[in-house]
Image (cartoon, grey):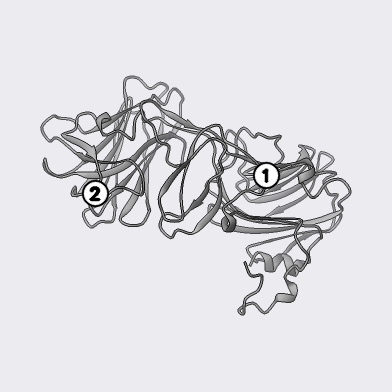
Amino acid sequence: MPLFTSSIELSDDYPSIRPSLNLNFAGSRALDPRITFTRASVGTYVDGNGQFKTVGNNEARFDHDPLTLESLGLLIEESRTNLVNNNTNPSSWIAVASAVNETTYPIKGLATTRVTDSPSDGDSPYLGAVSWGTGSSIPLCMSIYVDAVNSTSDTITLFLFGSGYINHTWNISTGVPVPTESFSINGSNYNSGSQEFIDCGGGIYRLILKANFTGSLVSGACRFYLAPSGGPTDYAIIAGPQIEQGAFPTSYIPTSGSSVTRQIDNAYILNDNVPIRTGVGEYSFYVRGRLLTTAPLFGISRGLVGMGNSTSNRIRIPHDSQGAVEIYSGNSLQVSFNTGSFGTVERKVALAVKKDDFALSLDGGTVLTDTSGNIPVDITTIGFGQSGYDAPPVTNPSTCYIKEFRIYPKRLTDAQLQLLTS
């Protein structure tokens, strides 16, 4: 990747010093051998051709935007369970006129089903699901991939069913989903819902229904209902039915007879592979990535990168949903740069660390400085998808993309920090 282009005139400010750690996940789509990566399950991702792929245990995923095919970098996700028992076999659909393998219009490498409703049986097609348990407020996320161009049904309705239900309808008659923004609720166990849809390219969309289950206990069957409109010959082409206990959708989780849990992703660098150990008095970081949510997980803040050797000596980028970048030394907060919420868009952060000489630039903005504070005594762990020091393997990683991460063995100038993040 070139460091300079004809459109950049500020080459004198670009760091000429060689990084002591230079990770370009989006460009290389590979792990540096200094990184330890674990995940105790298979996982899925979108490849550079827009196709869904599955990798085995302990294999990192380098995801792509399904629409633009942009390389998004290293994917880190929290653990999630697909509560739908079987989302790959057409014979699992119940109360359906027809559900068969779709071979003419397969959806991006997924097991695809052509579903036709029966207008005379008094029910809509559904898949069985595992109960989402007990609790006064359980966030749920229901999703499915649909071929909006080649389906002949004018509308598709998703029902999240268990101790009542909540549903939402999208009109797909034009080949692009149009949400009704009307949510029908049966019973008192669901509050008002929300919807979204993601354009996956080629007329494929991921339809998403979100709601909170507000009852204390799910009683009876839990189901994933799909209601395509039209006559006995109309159908919906779908793939990847998924129900997750969480406030936002995560990557596709295939199931074939029972619910499946995708375990957490852990990616970290330890001990002598970390280039900023005891005795290093100055250094700078560059991080380029995107949080997929800023809501805390079990009270733990989201973050792109966390470093340290204990909770007493650590660096957080960022620390919380307000975007604070913090540096601790000797169990005391030394520096806090409040950048405002990081949000869920791609951000570039450059942080300079030196005793009584700290600086930060976010997305090429004004450089923030702090001229008082000590640096961490030692850094023995770098964790990706962490908000602070957490001895690996972490329990609750952030769900995020990391495109690039660098460490420079010098306190870069303010101009260099700003140029790096522009």
Q: Position of residue 42 (x, y in %)?
A: 49, 36
Q: Residue furthest right?
A: 279
Indicate whether 27 appears above or below 318.
Answer: below
Q: Residue at x 24, y 52 (%)?
A: 172
Q: Quadrant of the N terminus?
A: bottom right
Q: Residue at x 72, y 70 (%)?
A: 14
SS under mark 2: loop
Labels 2 and 1: the sequence-earlier one: 1
Q: Quadrant of the C terminus?
A: bottom right
- Which image quadrant for residue 233? top left
Q: Is residue 122 left or right of residue 408?
A: left
- Is residue 366 visible from the viewing direction of this image? no
Cα separation, mark 2 vs mark 1, equals: 42 Å
Q: What amino acid is labelled 1 in the image?
A: Ile
Q: Can you tell which mark lies on residue 35?
A: 1
SS under mark 1: loop
Q: Position of residue 209 (x, y in %)?
A: 36, 41
Q: Residue at x 24, y 49 (%)?
A: 104
Q: Position of residue 269 (x, y in %)?
A: 71, 43
Residue tagged 2: 104
Q: Position of residue 47 (x, y in %)?
A: 46, 52
Q: Residues within 10 Å of mark 1 (few under 14, many from 20)?
A: some
- Is residue 334 visible from the viewing direction of this image? yes
Q: What amino acid is labelled 2 in the image?
A: Thr
Q: Is residue 282 left or right of residue 320?
A: right
